[in-house]
Image (cartoon, helix red, strand yellow):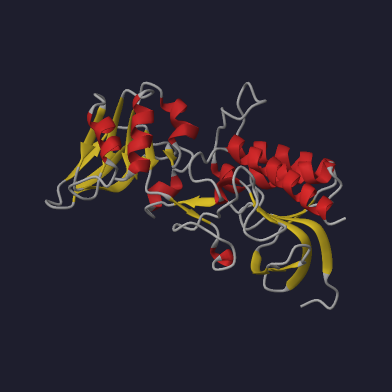
Amino acid sequence: MSDTIERIKCLIIGSGPAGYTAAIYAARADLKPVVYTGLEMGGQLTTTTEVDNFPGYPEGIDGPALMDDLKNQAERFGTEVRFGIVTKVDLNKEIGGIHKVTIDEAVEVEAETVIISTGATAKYLGLESEQRLKGGGVSACATCDGFFYRNQDVVVIGAGDTAAEEATYLANICKSVTILVRKDYMRASKAMQTRVDNTENIKVMFNTELDEVLGDKVVEGVRVFNNITNEKQELKVTGVFIAIGHKPNTEIFKNIIDTDEVGYIQTKGKSTKTNLPGVFAAGDVQDKEYRQAVTAAGTGCMAALDAERYLGTLI
């Protein structure tokens, strides 16, 4: 540990749309924010080739370029962006208390306010072809990427409400949607299963798993297998949507900050306040409903305003 401990007025953990938007607002409020980026600078959007639904980009923009724009805007107002991973937190439970955060298991900093915007990570199956074709037809967000598959054939992997919601959303855009379900039943709620059953261009294949995503640079199809008969077949599709859930990146906050049963940070009412004074949460780390760049940015703005008002009460 360093002998001199730095004191930061507003520490932002995470560098996705929520983190950078929080930084823009915090910097303009003279909170002199410091952003620690985490391992994936720019968050999930850096793995997205095209973003068509973020306001202000009428021609669309690729994910890394969008995140560079947000980063540059935050830095323009004085935000200090640092590459580093928060590995330990010691968060104060007292109003006006100082929070201690360790970076890369080596450097300790102190913060008067902390904004957590560490996001959530989409769960994938772990196939080499699936990882290779991320952004080339493999996606974990139908709302984000479904538009690009208008009038095309796609598959959705999953059996819960998320898979059912993604499939019914895609059915309004795509020519056909095939849901691959590992077991002989779906775990989705009755209401969601009814929606699936009543949608003509959705087909459900039970006891079916993804064996490989086919294609070199873009998805050209999938090979699937029946886990009862081991029979394999190929489906011609251009899009593969993995809908087996997300995992919030909250492991280091476990038993420190209130979370729900899955691990998403719980915030109070319409605010971004957590159960600890001076600690706020924004973006996908506390939002399992929408998970969009624009909604994450909105809560980033809210978190910065909440932090500014909190500090104002201490004067």
Pinpoint residue 72: horizontal percent, then vertical percent. 77, 41
Question: In x, y percent, where is residue 281?
Answer: 63, 52
Can residue 64 be seen in this snapshot? no
The residue at the far left in this view is 229
**Residue in view at x 55 percent, y 55 percent:** 265
Compared across the picture, whether 66 is left or right of 215 comes to: right
Residue 96, above or below 48: below
Q: Residue at x 77, y 42 (%)?
A: 24
x then y, percent, for residue 294: 61, 35
Position of 294 relative to 107 (above/below): above
The quarter of the picture where the C terminus appears is bottom right
Instruction: Count numbered badges in the picture.
Output: 0
Q: Quadrant location of residue 302?
A: top right
Question: Residue 37 at what x, y percent from top left?
Answer: 68, 54
For the N terminus, the image quarter is: bottom right
Q: Quadrant of residue 46?
A: top right
Residue at horizontal 75%, vertical 62%?
95
Of residues 291 and 216, which is closer to you in this image? Answer: 291
Quarter assignment of residue 28: top right
Closer to us: 117 or 239? 117
- For the point 84% across and 44% down, the residue is 29
Q: Seen in the image, is 99 located left or right of residue 30?
A: left
Relative to the observer, which residue lies in front, 90 or 276?
Answer: 276
Is 64 on the left-hand or right-hand side of 113?
Answer: left
Q: Is residue 179 visible?
A: yes
